[in-house]
Image (cartoon, rainbow, N blue to C red):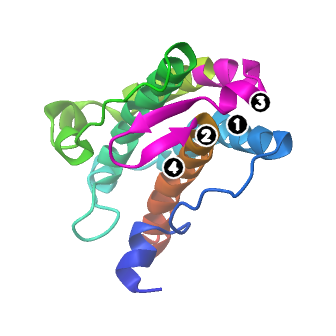
Amino acid sequence: MKEIERLKYPTGRFKAPKEYTDELRESFISGIEETPFYLRQAVENLDEDQLNTPYREGGWTVKQVVHHLPDSHMNALIRYKLALTENEPTIKTYKEDAWAELEDYVTTPVDISLNLLETVHIRWVILLKSMSQEQFKRKMNHPEVGIIDLNWLLAQYAWHGKHHIAQIDSLKERMGW
């Protein structure tokens, strides 16, 4: 694996499972449930200079990564609700890189986003645990990916949290923090 690829994707790129079982869904839901804890642990005791350090050259700062996660996961929760209440809705995408340049990513203390992520995940996990196998098969149209179901989205977001936490952890390891 090339160095830039390893820095961008320390857990590897997302690969959707070929099939989804109840056990696999439970594992993904547990991963989503644990993400806020592991993110908080990853940034615990980092000072402002460390929080403003990019996880790789040309990449987001640790602070931007922290603020990105609740933004992304709030969108995921809304996407779930749309797919559960509408017939194959087309979801709205957003420009993650542009959001990361907005002032709230620069000046908001990371605790605000850590708390927001915890709250969003509580609601999201309650919803996920209430869903049937049939509900996880509900579909949406993602303009950048195509037609996907809620199983795929569950796997993708379980990976997403681990992916960004691994970016922070690998930076801390390289920097000796």
Residue 24: x percent and y percent?
A: 78, 47
Q: How many marks?
A: 4
Q: Is residue 130 above or below residue 20?
A: above
Report how far apart the C-alphas of labels 2 and 3 lie in the structure.
Answer: 12 Å
Task: Answer whether labels 2 and 3 touch (C-beta < 8 Å).
Answer: no
Residue that carries the numbered disc 4 in the rendered image: 160
Question: Which amino acid is tagged 2?
Answer: Leu
Task: Answer whether labels 2 and 1 touch (C-beta < 8 Å).
Answer: yes
Residue 132: x percent and y percent?
A: 77, 23
Q: Is residue 153 above or below residue 52?
A: above
Instruction: Magenta stretch: give its range.
Output: 124-149
Residues packed near mark 1 inside 10 Å, few (<14), some (14 to 19) or many (20 plus): many
Pick whichever, 177 or 144, lies toward us. Answer: 144
The dot on residue 29 is 1
Q: Say which label, 2 or 1, has the lower sequence index.
A: 1
174 displayed left or right of 158: left
Question: Which amino acid is tagged 1?
Answer: Ile
Pick whichever, 83 or 67, lies toward us. Answer: 83
52 displayed left or right of 126: left
Report how far apart the C-alphas of labels 2 and 4 lie in the structure.
Answer: 10 Å
Pick whichever, 42 or 136, lies toward us. Answer: 136
Farthest-out residue, right: 23
Farthest-out residue, top: 85
Q: Secondary structure at mark 3?
A: helix
Report how far apart the C-alphas of labels 4 and 3 lie in the structure.
Answer: 22 Å
Q: Quadrant of residue 8?
A: bottom left
Q: Say which label, 2 or 3, has the lower sequence index.
A: 3
Q: Quadrant of residue 105?
A: top left
Residue 1: x percent and y percent?
A: 48, 86
Q: Let me know if residue 138 is in the magenta part.
A: yes
Q: Say which label, 4 or 3, has the lower sequence index.
A: 3
Report how far apart the C-alphas of labels 2 and 1 lie in the structure.
Answer: 7 Å
